[in-house]
Image: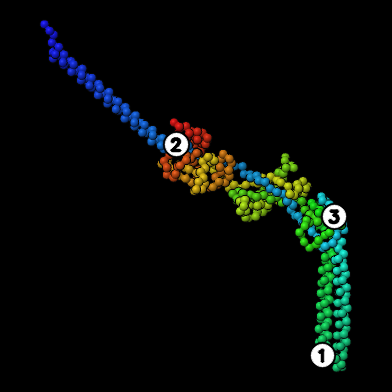
Amino acid sequence: MPTDHGSPTLRWKLGVFGLIAAVAAAVVVVMGITAREESNARLRDWAETQAVPAVAVVRPERKAVDAVLELPGRLEAYSRAAIYARVSGYLKGWKVDIGANVAAGDVLAEIDAPDLDQQLNQARADLASARASATLSEATLNRRKALLSANFVSMQEIDERIADLTNKRAAVNAQQANVDRLEALAGYKTITAPFDGVVTARNTDIGALISGGGSAGPPMFVIADVSRLRVYVDVPQSYVPAIRIGAAAAIVTPDYPDRSFAAVVESSSQSVDVGSGTTRMQLKLDNTKRELMPGGYASVRLTLATDAVPLHIPASALVFDQHGLRVATVGEGDRIRFKTIRIARDLGREIVVGGGLLPDDRIIVAPPDGIADGDQVRVVGARNGGDKPAAAAQEQEQDSKG
């Protein structure tokens, strides 16, 4: 007798198994969709996070800087005179050579000026002639006055004689002035030192033709007072306010590399050279022992006056664009805020800030390209004021790669 495969029990079992399989398939589908949605959500969150630039920040540090500025300078004699001839002639002889120490009034050379001597002799003769004429005119006037009471001469003649005497006396004065002028010129035939010093140059010799009254050629002698020296140094404009009159300085020269000489800031030009952007300052240096020579090179170490301990930031934080020199800071809500600053000193890896920042500002160590005011950023490596810029920048780089 055949078996009945279509019994109700068998169909019920098959229906249950089908239902269980359908439920399992539905559960698998739902779990797959849920997992995919969660993965997509995580991917969107990661993409949004990566779209916000990651930046490392540090705070400005207060550091006491070495308040010394070293600049090249030039040594010059405190007093220097180029000696030119005042009269023309031939050099009769010179008394001192280069390197000689001279005192004020010492004879340096003598000039033979025969033309001037003859002019002086003629002027003296003219003066004697004018005096004789004036004496004769005065005697004639006195005689005419004696005859005036007897009516032998007229008053007109007396007036004429008085005018003649006045004219003759004026001629005497003119000739006397000419004699005095030539005698003064004759005094310049002897060349003397104007002050105590050293002969640093002699540009003439015996028999040389001397042209007086001009300075077109080289001077006959150069006298320099080297007991004191002036030191000239060109200071960049940004450092000028920190260098006070009377500030101490140290001078080092190539001929004494292991020694320093004390100097004092004496004066400032009070102007900025448009070509170099520097202000020339003058220092005074005692050189009583005459160890240093004028005209020499010197390294000048100036003491800077600092009113407060300045702020330091990493050099990598600087941004220079059409808006000037700025740094990017992170403000409220982790948004970019640019600040314009002024550099006081450039120390290489660090910058001494002269103004524009506050101690609690968060400075971006290495600002990404293209950021602008108000941009949202993600801060990494945010520490206290003792941040190491290199470590913070490395963390920023690693975070951006991750």
Label 1 amino acid?
Met
Question: Nearest the camera: 244 or 292?
Answer: 292
Q: Is residue 16 left or right of residue 101?
A: left
Residue at the bottom extreme of this rendering: 151
x 57%, y 46%: residue = 344
Q: How was this image coloured?
A: rainbow
**Real-space Cα separation, disc 1 to disc 3, in angstroms:** 66 Å
* The disc label shown at residue 54, or none: 2
x 81%, y 89%: residue = 156
Q: Is residue 243 visible?
A: no
Label 2 amino acid?
Ala
Q: Locate the N terminus and report the quarter of the image it occupies.
A: top left
Q: Is residue 214 visible?
A: yes
Q: Secondary structure at mark 1?
A: helix
Q: Nearer the viewer, mark 1 or mark 3?
A: 3
Q: Secondary structure at mark 3?
A: loop
Which x, y percent locates residue 232?
Answer: 69, 50
Q: Locate the C terminus and report the quarter of the image it occupies.
A: top left
Q: Is residue 269 left or right of residue 108?
A: left
Question: Nearest the camera: 275 or 364?
Answer: 275
Q: Is residue 294 left or right of residue 390?
A: right
Q: Which residue is mark 3?
A: 205
**Real-space Cα separation, disc 3 to disc 2, in angstroms:** 81 Å
Q: How many residues crowd mark 2 within 10 Å: few (<14), some (14–19), many (20+)?
A: many
Question: Nearest the camera: 179 or 77?
Answer: 179
Q: Which residue is mark 1?
A: 155
x 27%, y 25%: residue = 29
Which x, y percent locates residue 308?
Answer: 57, 46
